[in-house]
Image (cartoon, rainbow, N blue to C red):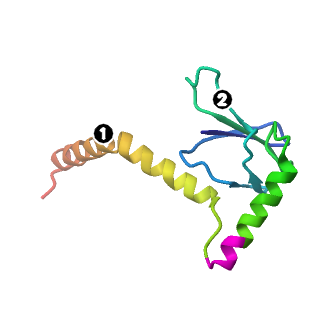
Amino acid sequence: MRILYFKVDGLTSVEKTKTNPRLLEMPDGYHPVTNDSVWQDSKRLMAPLLIIIQGVRGPYGATMENKDVSSVLYEIELAERAFKKANVSKMWMRSLERLIEFIQARGIYLGIVIFVLYFLGQSMFGGT
């Protein structure tokens, strides 16, 4: 899923995530993920989009926001009574997920380049 976060100053940040949580943490607070707020391609060729506007509680297109917010709050209360944590997608966890994905995709190439540069530097500067 791609998360488009529109800020009030006109900038947009785009994130990719594999998780589908009930609550998303963004810089301005928590936003509920409703059933009708995830936009998908009609042929399901592209990743689903979730559009969040800064300062607006529900994502773009969320018409059942009041019901979903109350059900999310009820789920959080049930989780607290069962001594569990609520299912919230944190910003730092999504960035850690992107870092691990980057290392898995391009880490071996970076490791080879660093390895070659290290030994070239050793041979050029007369390492012991």
Q: Secondary structure at mark 1?
A: helix
**Where residue 38 sits in the image (x, y, percent)?**
70, 37
Q: Residue at x 23, y 47 (%)?
A: 115
Residue 109 disc label: 1
How many discs appear?
Answer: 2
**Where residue 80 sits in the image (x, y, percent)?**
68, 76
10 part of magenta stretch: no
- The N terminus sits in image quarter: top right
Residue sitting farthest toward the top: 43
Q: Earlier in the sequence, mark 1 or mark 2?
A: 2
**Mark 2 — residue?**
40
Q: Secondary structure at mark 2?
A: loop
79 part of magenta stretch: yes
Can you tell which quarter of the image residue 87 is in? bottom right
**Where residue 113 sits in the image (x, y, percent)?**
28, 41
Q: Which residues are magenta?
A: 78-83
Above or below: residue 90 compared with residue 17: below
Please name the predominant secondary structure of the magenta segment in the image.
helix
